[in-house]
Image (spheres, rainbow, N blue to C red):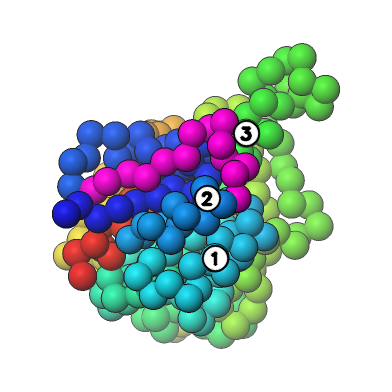
Amino acid sequence: MAPKIFIDGEHGTTGLQIRTRMADRRDVELLSIPEAERRNAAMREDMLNSADIAILCLPDDASKEAVKMVSANNKVRVIDTSTAYRVNPGWAYGFAEMDKEQGDKIKAARFVANPGCYPTGAIGLIRPLRAAGILPDGYPVTINAVSGYTGGGKQMIAQIENADHPDAITAPHFLYGLPLTHKHVPEMTAHGLLDRAPIFSPSVGKFPQGMIVQVPLHLDNLAEGATLESIHAALVAHYAGQDIVQVVPLAESRALPRVDAVELAGKDTMKLFVFGTPGSTQVNLVALLDNLGKGASGAAVQNMDLMLSA
């Protein structure tokens, strides 16, 4: 019998993307609430408790409510795409490539917290350097990023795509999170193994899907002997043996005239780059991904497949 999967919040941006990725699969059975019944609490609770894996695509409070609904039912496993549980030690963090053991932790877990899109890029760049001892304690990390507007959900999609929206956004690019208290900072700090919260400056571009995350570094403030080449080698070693995260060769990176934020739109992979001039004291680490791919729905499906393989 095929395992039953219920996407709670299937009509939202992330949920719809998950359904698209699973549309042709015959190895799972998708449980579904008709859109007209999506506020039917009894039907929702029944679906949650009938599933083998429930994927929550909900705001934080609604996710917490859903977890309470299945807490006594040990049969139901949960993937939560909100920020509610991403730094909860009782939940496995759903970035399988983060460490060598992380895939096995996800596979064995009952509760998995899907990473945020910005943190996936930032942690993907930072954690290997912390683990290798290259990025020292106390380093003042800064993270600058631009995302496609679908990362803001249906509200932002309507603001950008509907010129008649009462709060329409017409700018081609804008900064937000200006008080430096973005909800992703605790996640980046914890899973990036940082002892000091980074300064995170997020922005949105007028393109639907895609993302660039940048972490600039001063080599002379890193571990003694750190070079552009040693940083690249640490990333290569960290991601050896898997094919979701690709560390772009230095020669290939040096030949690039630019990095296009939408290059991986529609894909569930991530590219990491190390940019800089040989002999310089500065490098720029860059992650390229789809905010709805490896940054959300693609990661959720990847985590589901790991859990089903247990």
Percent across and percent down for residue 215 are 53, 59
Q: CA distance from mark 3 to mark 2?
A: 21 Å
- Residue beneath disc 2: 44
Percent across and percent down for residue 41 are 60, 50
Q: Which residue is at 53% across, 32% downward? A: 35
Mark 1 crowdedness (10 Å alpha carbons): few <14, some 14-19, many ≥20: some
In terms of image quadrants, where is residue 173? top right
Amino acid tagged 3: Lys
| Residues tagged 1 and 2 counted as in contact (Cβ below 8 A) | yes
Circle 3: element type: helix
The answer to which of marks 3 and 1 sits earlier in the sequence is 1
Tell me: residue 273, above or below residue 36: below
Query: Which is nearer the eye, 150 or 74?
Result: 74
Query: Which is nearer the eye, 207 or 156?
Result: 156
Percent across and percent down for residue 55 are 43, 54
Q: Which residue is at 59% across, 44% downward? A: 40
Write down the region rendered in magenta.
28-41
* Magenta-drawn stretch contains 39: yes
Amino acid tagged 1: Met
Mark 2 crowdedness (10 Å alpha carbons): few <14, some 14-19, many ≥20: many
The quadrant of the picture occupied by the C terminus is bottom left
- Residue beneath disc 1: 69
Q: CA distance from mark 1 to mark 2?
A: 10 Å
Amino acid tagged 2: Arg
- Residue beneath disc 3: 154
In terms of image quadrants, where is residue 94? bottom left
